[in-house]
Image (cartoon, helix red, strand yellow):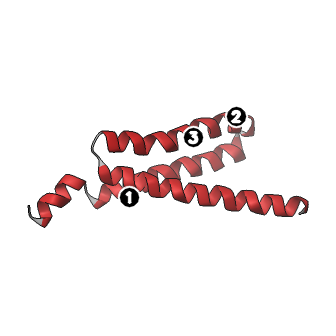
Amino acid sequence: MTHNQKTQKDGSLKDLWLGIGLSMGIYLLGLFILLVVSPIFMAYVCIAVVAIIVIPIVSFAKGRKRLGQGALIGLGLNILLFTACFGIILYNLGG
């Protein structure tokens, strides 16, 4: 098996960036909803958390390995962003 055949089987680098962009797009859409329509924000967060976890599972199940890897990278970035922002908020509220 040559290197080219292995790359075609695993997926392209475009799929990796698509997975990262999809996860970060969900995060940015949440910020937009928070600023524009804040009453539905909590409902969106519940749906977004499920979507961010389900996307890598479905990607790996369908054989799109790179898309799943990108979605997992995006999931890690989302977790880091959420925890950093939550820590800043808690610190500023009186810690």
Q: Residue at x 26, y 57 (%)?
A: 12
The picture quadrant where one finds residue 61 is top left
The first of marks 2 and 3 along the sequence is 2
The first of marks 3 and 1 along the sequence is 1
SS class of the residue under badge 3? helix
Q: Position of residue 56 (x, y in %)?
A: 41, 45
Classify 10 Å Cα crowding around label 3: few (below 14), some (14-19), many (20 and above): some
Residue 57 drawn above or below residue 71: above
Left or right: residue 29 versus residue 20 is right
Q: Position of residue 45 (x, y in %)?
A: 64, 40
Q: Which quadrant is the C terminus positioned in?
A: bottom right
Residue 32 drawn above or below residue 84: above
Q: Which residue is mark 1?
A: 17
Classify 10 Å Cα crowding around label 2: few (below 14), some (14-19), many (20 and above): few
Q: Which residue is mark 3?
A: 48
Q: Residue at x 49, y 56 (%)?
A: 74
Mark identifier at residue 45: none
The first of marks 1 and 2 along the sequence is 1
C-alpha span from label 1 to label 2: 29 Å
Q: Closer to the camera: disc 2 or disc 3?
A: 3
Classify 10 Å Cα crowding around label 1: few (below 14), some (14-19), many (20 and above): some
Q: Position of residue 33 (x, y in %)?
A: 65, 43
Q: Which residue is mark 2?
A: 40
Q: Residue at x 35, y 43 (%)?
A: 59
